[in-house]
Image (cartoon, rainbow, N blue to C red):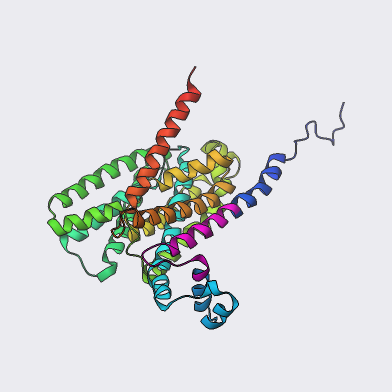
Amino acid sequence: MPAASEPIHKPAPPATAAVARPRRWPVLLLLAALLVIATLVSIGTGAVKIAPLQVIGILLHKLGFSAASLADAHPGFAFTDQQAAVLHAIRLPRVLLGVLVGAALSVSGAALQGLFRNPLADPGLLGVSSGAALAVSASIVLGFKTLGLYTLPAAAFTGSVAAIGIIYALARKDGRANVATMLLAGIAINALCGAGTGVFTYFSNEDQLRAITFWLLGSLGGATWQTVIATAPLILACLCVMPFLASTLNALLLGEANARHLGISVETAKWIIVAMVALGVGASVAMTGMIGFVGLVVPHLIRLWHGPNHRLLLPASALLGAILLVLADLAARTIVSPLEMPIGIVTSALGAPFFLYLLLRKKGLNAP
């Protein structure tokens, strides 16, 4: 008979966590390296060709290094004034905006899928995109130009935050937000905002219709240093806060009751997750328009690769989402060059076949 001071059952040490944690860094380092490569390729590809070494040379020159000394150090660093102007004024802000938006959409999708415990959840589910679309359509058709170039981004951000605020308010009861009610409210608000967008589209003239359609399809073509600087703080706030919620999201996968037993403040976690999604996706949609499937597909790819642990899923989704959107933008501006295809078409063309593959794969696994 064991002594009273000795426990009858000694719990095993958390070996799985100790084993899983070291494997995070090789995955993240690999994805970071791929992001650097994708960025260099995207920056250098276009009507004005810029080799990877020339990209590095231009960036070093912007940091204060002499162009002559760089060319003396290695001939590949030599560049022309035209290449430097194109990189700095056009391609670099565009690629940086793509990195930020791709990361924000993917992390938000991963967080919502964990919150709803539903692999089909994505940022559009909470009405972020549809609310932005309604506000932008109204702004275009009614002729609001109060903020000049920032009128549409401001309208989109306001519409997305308003939509998600209404959904969260509808889902609250007795101080708690019911996830199932939030999901149903999101579907209803999406439909309502879609109807409103349709009304404004119907009453638009030819130029207004073209502007609404182009915005709904999404594009990084309007990226400037001003848009990057305006968007970066909001998106970076989302990206910096989300990893601290990894343990909470892992607990929520077990159900809200179990998460509460583990000491998680579930209601506070819901509020923070929804607020960060509104912040990151609202800022992204405001600057680029509606870009679908990124927040839906990328978390799935990471889960298929390395499982559902949010400690890896969130940062890996950010990196892979940035890679995917940078490459999608590269395809959008080169496939039909000198014209530019809306990036939403490219992401949808990539995302739809992937989900058909997942459907067929699941059907095969469930077959008797």
Residue 315 in percent (x, y) is at 55, 52
| Residue 221 visible (yes or no) | yes
Q: Residue furthest top?
A: 368
Q: Is residue 266 above or below residue 151?
A: above
Q: In the image, is residue 191 part of the stretch drawn in magenta?
A: no
Q: Quadrant of residue 1?
A: top right
Residue 217 in percent (x, y) is at 29, 52
Q: Quadrant of residue 4?
A: top right
In this image, 31 relative to 288: left or right? right
Q: Nearer the viewer, residue 35 or 201?
A: 35
Q: Nearer the viewer, residue 297 or 94?
A: 94
Q: In the image, is residue 40 part of the stretch drawn in magenta?
A: yes
| Residue 114 visible (yes or no) | no
Please give the range of residues in magenta: 30-54
Q: Is residue 236 above or below residue 77?
A: above
Q: Nearer the viewer, residue 149 or 177?
A: 149
Q: How many marks?
A: 0
The secondary structure that most of the magenta stretch takes on is helix
Q: Nearer the viewer, residue 83 or 271?
A: 83
Q: Residue furthest front?
A: 75
Residue 329 in percent (x, y) is at 38, 56
Which residue corresponds to the image point at 57% horizontal and 82% vertical from the top-left?
69
Which residue corresponds to the image point at 55% horizontal and 36% vertical from the top-left?
254
In this image, 277 relative to 30: left or right? left
Residue 246 in percent (x, y) is at 56, 48
